[in-house]
Amino acid sequence: MRKSIVLLACIIVICGWISAGKLYAEVSRIEITERTAFAGGMSFGKVGSYEKIRGRLHYAVDPENESNAQIVDLQYAPRNADGLVEFEGDFVLLKPVNLERGNHRLLYDVNNRGGLRMLAHFNSARGSNNPSTVEHAGNGFLMRQGYSLLWCAWNWDVAPGNDKMQIDLPIATKDGQTITALINAELSIVSSETKVQKFAWGGSRCYEVVNPEDNSTATLTVRDDPMGQRREIPRDRWRFGLLEGENVVADSTNVYFEDGFQPGKIYELLYVAKDPRVVGLGLAAIRDAISFFHFETKDSVGTPNPLAESGQERLSKPDPEFAYIFGISQSGRVTVHMIYQGFHVDEKGRMAFEGAWPHVAGGGKGGFNFRFAQTTHHPSHIEGNYFPADYFPFNYNLQQIRSPAGPVMCWRLPRRKEKFPTFLSRIMRWNTGPDRRHSFIPM
C-alpha cells in the first residue's frame, strides 16, 4: 500500500511539470442512467462527499483520421451518414460533489475483463463492479486525495453478469460480404470429465462457427502437453453442439465430444469462424473516454460533462488539469499496448492522458488489435502459448526501439515526441535485447 501511494505521488509531481492542452474527444453523446450519492454520502476529509455517475458513452470515430490508422479492419466497419464509425459502451465515474475541493486530477482504471480493480488496489476496498457502498470505498485513500475516478468498457468479449462492463463493437464486413477465417481455440480441461466444452476461454464470448451443422472443414486434436504431438479425433466422434437433456443439438459456440473431454489434456479446435469485431476500437474507447472527461464541457447534443459542472454551476472548462491511466496485469498490458500503438494520442493529435502506470504487466502488450482477436485470453505456461503478449519491443529503451530488425518495431511515443512519465511496478527484469545477451530494465 505504501509503495502504491509513493508511486502515485511521483506521477502527480512529475506531471505537474507538463502543460495540458485542449482536446476534442470522440464521444458523441453521454447517456447518464444513474446519478446517486456514493457511499451513502460519506464525507472524505476536506474533499467532502462523492457522487457516483453511471451510464453509456456513445462514440463516433473517424476512419480517415491518422490517430485511428492503426485500428485493424476499421475500414470494413459500417459508417453513419457522416462517414464515422459508431459504437457504445458502459462507464462509471466517481467524483467529488464539490469539484473545487478535489485535486483536479482524473485517474482512469483499465477494467480487467469487465472488472473494476482500482478501489481494491489503492483503497483496500471490497471488490465490486458497481461501487456504491462504504465497503466499496475501503479506507477512502483516493477520495481523501480528491481524485475523480473513471472506468469504461473496452473489451468486446466480456460475457455479461456481475455488473461487468459491456461494450458493443461493430462487426467488420468486406464489400457487404461476411468475413470468415480459419481460427483456433484451445480447450483445457481442469476439473471433471465433460462431453461439452465452450470454445471461449474463461467464460468469455467467442466467434461463432460458420455452419454448426457441418464439421467437415474443422479439426479437433488432443495432446498431453503444450509441446506434445497432436492426435486428431475422428470427426464422427464429435460435433458442434451441446446437450439438451439427452439430445445433442447444434450450437455455434460449443463442441460436443462423445468420448468425453479428459482433465489434464489439451484439446485444440480449428474451425472456420465468422463476423470478426473491430476489436481495436476498444482501445480507442479508452482514449476517447478519458479525452472527453478531461477536455470537453459537453457532448454533441449539449449534455454537460459531469466534470464540467459543480452543483448547479457550469464550468468554463472541465475540472481535470491532468489525467492518468492505471492498469493491473492484463490491464497493464493494455496500457503499454496503447502507448506502443499510439492510442495515447487522440484524433486532434494531443495526449489523452499525461501519466501512465502499468502494474505487473512485465514487458507485455497483448492481442488487443487484430482480426478475430479475443481480448480476455492470454498465454500461460500450459495453454494459449500462441496468444500474443510478450513480444518485442519490451520497453522504451532506445536500444530496443531502434531494432536491428528495422523500423517496423517502434513505439509511437518517441516518434510523436510526446513525453510523459510511465511507471512500471513489479516488472519482469529478465527481458533481453535483440542480441539475446543484454538485459533491459524498463524505463
Image (spheres, rainbow, N blue to C red):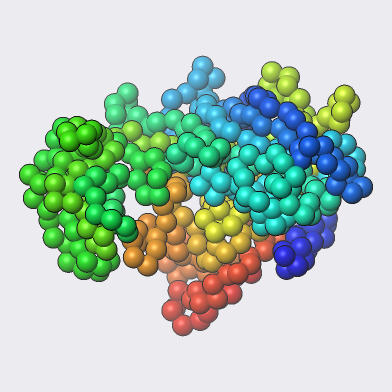
Residue 24 place in picture, x, y as percent: 69, 33
**What is the residue that sits farthest to the bottom in this orientation?**
437
Identify the residue shown where x is 29% and y is 29%: 178
The one nearer the camera, 359 or 437, is 359
Where, by quadrant of the figure, is residue 211 drawn?
top left
The one nearer the camera, 255 or 173, is 255
Residue 67 place in picture, x, y as percent: 57, 41
The N terminus sits in image quarter: bottom right
The one nearer the camera, 423 or 214, is 214
Specify whether 132 is left or right of 271: right
The C terminus sits in image quarter: bottom right
Identify the residue shown where x is 72% and y is 41%: 133
Residue 424 place in picture, x, y as percent: 63, 65
Identify the residue shown where x is 67% and y is 64%: 423
The one nearer the camera, 384 or 197, is 197
Specify whether 263 is left or right of 108: left
Specify whether 151 is left or right of 389: right
Residue 308 place in picture, x, y as percent: 81, 31
Q: Is 381 located above or below residue 299 in the figure?
A: below
**What is the residue that sits farthest to the front in this orientation?**
245
Residue 219 seen by the camera: no
Q: Is 89 located above or below residue 191 in the figure?
A: above
Residue 70 seen by the camera: yes
